[in-house]
């Protein structure tokens, strides 16, 4: 009998039989509060009626229409609808299936459009698991170890992550100064601007620990990109479609009314409420510089996934889920900070060193009594929360961050329930 690979370690013990909103139900019918959202995918919640109806209707009409062979209406409608929410100037879209594919498509476009070989990524970034995407990923060695040689031409520069420089006493401003100075040094000593095709960066580090960027850092990237003719690729795979309380994560760092930050933008995860679809967006002029035949794929822009994505955009707009993400995110961070303060006071040390994030993308960073990353306690708290009916995930380079990433439909009372369960779990593990 075939079994799943033993390397597929489960984050929770749940065997789910159905889902509704932010709830998953096990085989005995017991509810579990899902604050994982399939790693940020089920943006409108599990089985939103509008998304279910759109997918069911499309399944009865056309399931697969390979989009370099034929066109289909869901694809055309989705492309039109995306034009309403994409940043100004990004008016050409290529669809694929996963975030990794979007990363590789962005890389290929940047290299072909500029004729330059190198790409600069930022420490702690996650861009996928395929060879090229893993070569650009630095959030943890588990994503890139054991199958060398990796792709060449990748340079790594610091991200302004104050938690990495806490022992130096640096705040975000000092971390940003360091990151921009080191980027200038990299361009002077490792990859000449004339050899550098693009910068690729997440607005908020995902697997790297839920660390937001800031306006000055992104302005610095944009200025250097413009000065040197380098493209700026913004990876919105986890941060897009309202996750951070703005439609796009980089909207937090882009001056209102100013030019678009990104030359190329990647998206996936929350676009279709659980159906696999991803893509990149660029200007028509830039996209036209890709070489003929360099874009394609069998399952990209699947008809059912496109229909689900259109319904997802409808729900996000009509139910004001971006606004809900902002409001519930504020509530969640306030609640988690209260828990952290209470637990830290009880044990006399900052075991939860920081609660951070934007919108409904919130991380709790665990440190031990000596101030070192504490993955053991983070894992124990995450597992205890699961036993109490709250499903969470781990991230961070050491696995020291427990992340909260519920569907954007989460209610005020559901946030309160999650905070209460988390308080019980953390108290039992840290202060019990």
Image: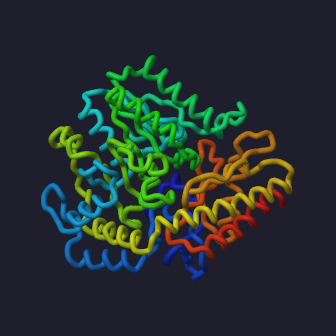
Residue drawn at the location 53% of the way across and 39% of the way down: 124
Q: Does 78 sit above or below residue 231? A: below
Q: Does 154 sit above or below residue 201? A: above
Q: Does 198 sit above or below residue 35? A: above
Residue 107, x across and y down, in percent: 32, 38
**Which of the 4 image quadrants contains residue 135?**
top left
Residue closest to the eye, 247 or 266: 247
Q: Quadrant of the N terminus?
A: bottom left
Residue 99, x across and y down, in percent: 38, 51
Residue closest to the eye, 351 or 100: 351
Residue closest to the eye, 84 or 366: 84
Residue drawn at the location 44% of the way across and 28% of the way down: 155
Residue extending farthest to the left is 69
Residue extending farthest to the bottom is 29
Residue 315, x across and y down, in percent: 39, 73
**Which of the 4 image quadrants contains residue 190?**
top left
Residue 158, x across and y down, in percent: 53, 32
Residue drawn at the location 60% of the way across and 34% of the way down: 175
On screen, residue 133 versus residue 203, left or right, reads left
């Amino acid at each position: 009998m075939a079994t799943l690979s033993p390397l597929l370690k489960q984050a929770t013990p749940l065997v789910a039989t159905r889902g509704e909103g932010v709830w998953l139900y096990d085989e005995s019918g017991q509810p579990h509060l899902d604050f994982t959202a399939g790693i940020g995918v089920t943006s409108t919640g599990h089985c939103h009626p509008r998304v279910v109806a759109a997918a069911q209707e499309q399944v009865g009409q056309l399931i697969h229409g390979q989009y370099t062979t034929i066109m289909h209406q869901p694809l055309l409608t989705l492309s039109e609808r995306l034009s309403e929410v994409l940043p100004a100037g990004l008016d050409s879209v290529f669809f694929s299936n996963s975030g990794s594919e979007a990363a590789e498509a962005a890389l290929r476009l940047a290299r072909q459009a500029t004729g330059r070989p190198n790409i600069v990524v930022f420490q702690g970034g996650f861009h996928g698991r395929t060879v090229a995407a893993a070569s650009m990923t630095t959030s943890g060695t588990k994503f890139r170890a054991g199958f060398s040689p990796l792709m060449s031409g990748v340079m790594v520069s610091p991200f302004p992550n104050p938690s990495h420089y806490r022992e130096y006493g640096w705040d975000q401003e000092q971390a940003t100064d360091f990151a921009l100075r080191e980027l200038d040094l990299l361009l002077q000593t490792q990859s000449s601007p004339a050899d550098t095709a693009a910068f690729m960066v997440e607005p908020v580090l995902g697997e790297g620990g839920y660390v937001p960027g800031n306006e000055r850092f992104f302005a610095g990237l944009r200025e250097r990109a413009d000065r040197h003719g380098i493209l700026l690729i913004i990876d919105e795979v986890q941060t897009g479609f309202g996750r951070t309380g703005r439609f796009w994560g980089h909207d937090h760092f882009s001056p209102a009314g100013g030019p678009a930050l990104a030359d190329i933008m990647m998206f996936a995860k929350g676009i279709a409420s659980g159906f696999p679809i991803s893509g990149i967006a660029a200007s028509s002029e830039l996209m036209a510089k890709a070489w003929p035949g360099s874009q394609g794929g069998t399952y990209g822009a699947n008809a059912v996934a496109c229909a689900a994505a259109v319904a997802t955009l409808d729900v996000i707009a009509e139910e004001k889920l971006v606004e809900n993400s902002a409001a519930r995110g504020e509530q969640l961070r306030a609640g988690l900070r209260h828990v952290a303060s209470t637990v830290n006071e009880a044990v006399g040390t900052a075991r939860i060193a920081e609660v951070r994030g934007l919108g409904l993308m919130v991380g709790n960073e665990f440190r031990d009594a000596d101030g070192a990353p504490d993955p053991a306690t983070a894992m124990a708290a995450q597992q205890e929360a699961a036993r109490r009916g709250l499903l969470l995930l781990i991230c961070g380079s050491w696995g020291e961050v427990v992340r909260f990433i519920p569907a954007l439909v989460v209610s005020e009372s559901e946030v309160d329930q999650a905070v209460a369960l988390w308080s019980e779990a953390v108290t039992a593990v840290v202060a019990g």
